[in-house]
Image (spheres, rainbow, N blue to C red):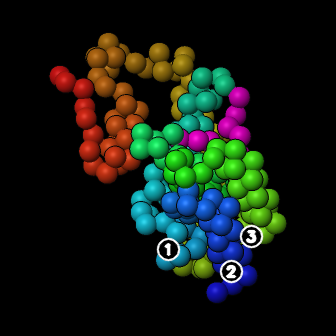
C-alpha cells in the first residue's frame, strides 16, 4: 500500500467524520478511464456509480458549452428524490462523488466544512503523478483531465452550420443519437428502470 493510497483512505475517513450520519458513500477515480484510485475500500457499495458520474460530467461539460454558459466549477450537485444529495468534485485529472443523506446533515456543514476540508486535503497530495504513472498493466494511453474534457467534446462535435449542411429531411425525422445516449445513461442511473414516453 503506497503513500497516496494511505492518504486517500485517511481523507475518506476524515470525510466520514465530517459528515457523520449523513455520509452514505464516496469514491474517487481517474477522469481518463473511470479507473478507481483505490479499490475494495468499502466506501462505495455500487462501483457502477463511478462510470455513470464520469459520463455525466462529460455530458454536463458538453451541455454547458453548447448553451454558452460559463464553465463548470470544481463541483456540481445532484438532488435526488429520496432526500439524498450527490456532490461530484471535478479535480483536474480525477473526480470524486459523495452521496449524503440530507435529513442527517445540515447543508451548511456540508458546504462550509466538509467540502472545503476535502478539497484542501486532496490538493495536498500528488494525485496527478499517481494517475499519470499507474501500474504498467493498467496505464491509460493518455491521461485525460476534467478541464480538457470539453475541448475533446467540441473537437468531436460538428458545428451547427456543418450539421445543417449534411442533414437531410429523412434524418430530421429520426431520433438523434444523443437522445439515445441520454436514455441509456438515465436507464443506468435508475438501475435498469426507465420509463419511456408513451408512443
In the picture, the disc for residue 129 is: 3
Give percent across and percent down for residue 103. 52, 47
Residue at 55 percent of width and 52 percent of height: 104
Is 47 part of what is drawn in magenta?
A: no
**Label 2: element kind:** helix
Q: Nearer the viewer, mark 1 or mark 2?
A: 1
Please state which of the two labelled residues, at mark 1 or mark 3, is closer to the viewer.
Answer: 1
Residue at the location (40% across, 18% down)?
167
Left or right placement of residue 51 versus residue 153 in this view: left
Counting residues from the start of the chain, the first of labels 3 and 2 encountered is 2
Tell me the residue that label 1 is attached to: 42
> Along the line of sight, which residue is nearer the eye, 170 or 96?
96
Looking at the image, is mark 3 or mark 2 nearer the viewer? 2
Residue 6 bears which disc, if any? 2
- Name which of mark 1 and mark 2 comes first in the sequence: 2
The C terminus is located in which quarter?
Answer: top left
Number of residues whose C-alpha sits closer than 10 Å to that of mark 2, classed few (under 14), some (14–19) or many (20 or more):
few
The residue positioned 42% from the left and 63% from the top of the image is: 46
Instruction: Locate residue 190 relative to residue 6 in the image: left or right.
Output: left
Tag 3–tag 2 contact (CB < 8 Å)? no
Which stretch did the figure color magenta? 70-78
Amino acid at each position: 500500500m503506497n503513500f497516496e493510497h494511505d492518504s486517500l483512505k485517511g481523507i475518506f475517513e476524515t470525510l466520514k467524520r465530517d459528515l457523520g450520519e449523513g455520509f452514505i458513500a464516496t469514491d474517487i477515480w481517474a477522469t481518463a478511464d473511470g479507473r478507481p484510485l483505490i479499490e475494495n475500500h468499502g466506501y462505495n457499495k455500487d462501483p457502477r456509480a463511478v462510470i455513470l458520474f464520469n459520463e455525466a460530467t462529460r455530458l454536463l461539460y458538453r451541455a454547458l458549452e453548447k448553451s454558452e454558459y460559463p464553465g463548470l466549477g470544481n463541483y456540481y450537485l445532484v438532488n435526488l428524490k429520496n432526500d439524498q444529495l450527490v456532490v461530484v468534485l471535478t479535480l483536474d485529472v480525477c473526480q470524486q462523488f459523495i452521496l449524503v443523506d440530507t435529513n442527517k446533515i445540515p447543508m451548511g456543514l456540508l458546504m462550509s466544512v466538509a467540502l472545503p476540508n476535502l478539497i484542501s486535503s486532496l490538493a495536498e497530495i500528488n494525485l496527478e503523478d499517481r494517475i499519470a504513472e499507474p501500474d504498467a498493466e493498467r496505464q491509460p494511453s493518455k491521461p485525460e483531465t476534467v478541464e480538457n474534457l470539453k475541448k475533446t467534446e467540441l473537437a468531436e462535435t460538428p458545428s451547427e452550420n456543418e450539421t445543417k449542411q449534411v442533414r437531410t429531411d429523412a434524418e430530421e425525422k429520426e431520433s438523434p443519437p444523443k437522445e439515445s445516449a441520454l436514455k441509456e445513461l438515465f436507464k443506468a442511473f435508475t438501475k435498469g428502470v426507465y420509463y419511456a414516453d408513451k408512443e
